[in-house]
Amino acid sequence: MEVFRCSRKDIIGKFEKLISVSGKIWDGSVLDVGCRNRKLKELLPQEIAYFGMDISAQADIIGNLDNGLPFHNNSFNVVVAFDILEHTNDIHFSFCELCRVTKRYLYITLPNMFDVKFRINLLFGNKISKKYGLPPDISRDRHRWFFSLYNAQHFIFTMANQKNMNIIKEGCLTGPHRGIWPMKKVIRCLPNLLCSTYVVILAKR
């Protein structure tokens, strides 16, 4: 599996790397599902027609993927869902909706909850992420699914085949410290232990 190393730990560093490894998929219109504060737009070419959808008020389109996407089939050249599917109640339906509205490409990232840092936190009884646990207050922004990198890979491969999508790029994303040589070689052998994010680009057949 290819290893993609971020140069920075923040969200901009992550987006920069995801764009740099994506090739020439950015063309025409882009739907960013779960866009948060629309930071991805700042890194895309200016000629791209960008639309950000989220439950957040900062989005261009306020909406929840759980309720379906309010667009016709094949509405966007590229559909992006970075760390979003794990937030949905029906992950299979959500994946199908992403496939439905893309005309050409679907770009997805999913977290690997079997990463070594999460395993250590679980071993010592520490909190693994603010997206999990049992908070006393109701939260709309939390993970509904707990899975490994290999679980994510199997899910995507199976669903892609069902929805007539081809996988054109696949890899795992890591931070600036883990991605240096010779650590990259080790990560390629143990991605389920040493990589935090599964990355995949799919194309419509």
Image (spheres, rainbow, N blue to C red):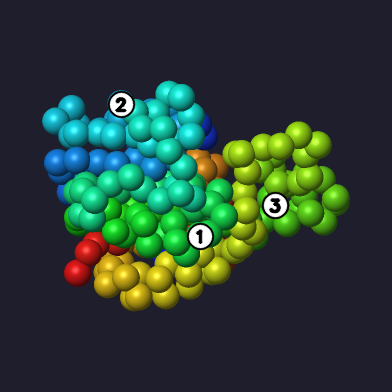
Q: Of the numbered discs in the image, which one, if any, rests on residue 91?
A: 1
Q: Disc 1 or 2, which lies upstream in sequence? A: 2
The kind of secondary structure element at disc 1 is helix
Residue at the spot 59% in from the left edge and 63% down from the top edge: 148
In the image, 89 versus 153, the foreground residue is 89
Quadrant location, the C terminus: bottom left
Q: Quadrant of residue 17?
A: top left
The kind of secondary structure element at disc 3 is helix
Quadrant location, the N terminus: bottom left
Residue at the spot 56% in from the left edge and 49% down from the top edge: 87
Task: List the residue tagged with mark 3.
Answer: 118
Q: Disc 3 or 2, which lies upstream in sequence? A: 2
Type of the residue with mark 2:
Glu
Looking at the image, is 45 positioned above or below residue 146? Answer: above
Mark 2 is surrounded, within 10 Å at the Cα level, by few (under 14), some (14 to 19) or many (20 or more) other residues, namely: few
Query: Could you tell me residue 137's position as x and y percent?
Result: 76, 34
Q: Residue furthest top?
A: 58
Position of 8 with respect to 43 (left or right) is right
Q: Residue furthest right?
A: 125
Residue 17 appears anywhere in the view: no
Q: Say whether marks 3 and 2 touch (CB < 8 Å).
A: no
Task: List the residue tagged with mark 2.
Answer: 42
Mark 1 is surrounded, within 10 Å at the Cα level, by few (under 14), some (14 to 19) or many (20 or more) other residues, namely: some
Mark 3 and mark 2: Cα distance apart in space: 31 Å
